[in-house]
């Protein structure tokens, strides 16, 4: 039986699934319900200095696919709007009632040493296991000189991280914004400041839709709209890349990672762990499906690990990192072709249309005497782009089969058509 226990920044957790700092972790009743459902930990919704912030109504906008499925949420809610002392009292109460679960205190303050240190000390006194520095919020708070306005400046990341390290003996998680050119600048700054781990990604700055009747971005607040923080399944590819960049970079590869961004299934969780994550944080999935979704994540991850023979999360952590390389390191002699299984084909023609109109005209289309539509790959034209296999609605109807060409590994730096190589 797979063991889902994990340790991050020296903190032991019964499983890697924590709720991220967000509405689901805003108060005692929410957190207790989460722990009853089986979550290993929570990052309490971000706390600031009193007086508390004032939130607006409404607060969420939706990005849906053509069938109405939720792709992502745009959120313009700010940090906790409840009094600091009330939050701290509830944290202390939950810690006493649930000693085997993890509570991380999230915090945000202006760029003043005393503000960060004094708030960190207060949160630490409530009994949290660690402190997360919210340096990523891209709306509302950044206009006040907090959130992503700090997280986009490496010097400020280093400075605020160091302040909190000096103020407490607790593990410090620096939460990074994706709204930056190179995530390594932020991660390296957090390391210089003494961070025990980084949490990423925070939400992506966005406008998800426009109300064409009101003519304002959603969510509409009194006839106006604003940019907000985008989260949910759609941000997962961005998060995976940034986690991988940190995990495979020589200067940051030992920095522990609490991964956030579109985690909705056990497979999502396994992918982040395979790319180097030590722990996981979830928000949107819980908001859309309720706290019990963690059951599916736990069961699915356990089954995956049992099937693969992994006894612990450490057994497969980072295994995909070693195979994540820059484009220039890919084998240009590798070749693959699409192969269509005629017995599985439902004759929908989607592969033909996509390839004919937008790709390489590598699929032929014929109609037999009995009216059967036959689609055949033209191997000389197929470049192995995967488009036909991705859009085919029938599982395993189209396979991408490697071509045995007996050619050696050849990357672009050594390719004879590389102008730099040719000039040598």
Image: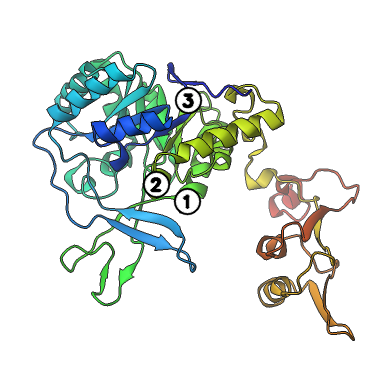
Residue labelled with disc 1: 233
Front residue of 240/27: it is 27
Neighbours of disc 1 within 10 Å: few (<14), some (14-19), many (20+):
some
Residue labelled with disc 2: 284
Neighbours of disc 2 within 10 Å: few (<14), some (14-19), many (20+):
many
Q: Circles 1 and 2: CB distance less than 8 Å? A: yes
CA gap, disc 2 and disc 3: 26 Å
Residue labelled with disc 3: 255
Q: Name the secondary structure under disc 2.
A: helix
Q: Name the secondary structure under disc 1.
A: helix
The image position of residue 227, as x and y in percent, is 28, 58
The image position of residue 321, as x and y in percent, is 62, 34
For marks 1 and 3, the one nearer the N-term is 1
Front residue of 185/142: it is 142
The image position of residue 389, as x and y in percent, is 72, 61
Residue occupying the point 72% across, 49% down: 412
């Amino acid at each position: 039986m797979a063991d889902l226990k994990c340790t991050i920044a020296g903190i032991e957790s019964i499983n890697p699934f924590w709720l991220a700092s967000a509405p689901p972790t805003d108060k005692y009743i929410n957190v207790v319900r989460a722990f009853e459902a089986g979550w290993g930990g929570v990052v309490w919704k971000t706390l600031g200095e009193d007086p508390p912030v004032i939130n607006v109504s409404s607060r969420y906008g939706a990005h849906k696919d053509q069938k109405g499925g939720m792709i992502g949420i745009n959120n313009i809610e700010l940090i906790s709007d409840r009094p600091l002392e009330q939050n701290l009292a509830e944290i202390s109460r939950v810690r006493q009632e649930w000693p085997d679960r993890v509570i991380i205190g999230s915090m945000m303050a202006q760029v003043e040493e005393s503000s960060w240190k004094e708030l960190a000390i207060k949160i630490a006194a409530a009994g949290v296991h660690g402190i997360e520095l919210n340096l990523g919020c891209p709306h509302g708070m950044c206009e006040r000189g907090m959130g992503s306005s700090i997280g986009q400046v490496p010097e400020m990341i280093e400075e605020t991280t160091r302040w909190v390290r000096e103020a407490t003996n607790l593990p410090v998680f620096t939460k990074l914004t994706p709204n930056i050119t190179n995530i390594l600048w932020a991660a390296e700054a957090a390391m210089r400041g003494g961070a025990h781990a980084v949490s990423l990604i925070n939400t992506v700055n966005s406008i998800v839709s426009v109300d064409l009747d009101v003519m304002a971005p959603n969510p509409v607040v009194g006839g106006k709209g604003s940019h907000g923080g985008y989260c949910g399944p759609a941000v997962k590819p961005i998060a995976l890349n940034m986690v991988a960049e940190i995990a495979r970079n020589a200067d940051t590869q030992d920095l522990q990672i609490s991964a956030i961004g579109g985690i909705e299934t056990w497979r999502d969780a396994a992918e982040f762990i395979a790319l180097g994550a030590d722990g996981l944080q979830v928000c949107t999935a819980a908001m859309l499906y309720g706290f019990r979704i963690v059951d599916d994540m736990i069961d699915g991850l356990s089954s995956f690990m049992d099937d693969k023979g992994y006894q612990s999360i450490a057994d497969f952590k980072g295994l995909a990192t070693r195979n994540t390389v820059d484009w220039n390191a890919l084998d240009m002699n590798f070749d693959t072709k699409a192969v269509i299984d005629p017995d599985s084909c439902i004759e929908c023609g989607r592969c033909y249309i996509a390839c004919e109109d937008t790709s390489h005209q590598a699929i032929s289309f014929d109609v037999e005497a009995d009216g059967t539509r036959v689609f055949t790959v033209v191997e000389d034209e197929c470049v192995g782009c995967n488009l036909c296999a991705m859009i085919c609605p029938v599982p395993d109807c189209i396979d991408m089969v490697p071509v045995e060409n007996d050619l050696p590994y050849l990357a672009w730096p050594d390719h004879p058509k590389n102008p730099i190589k040719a000039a040598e």
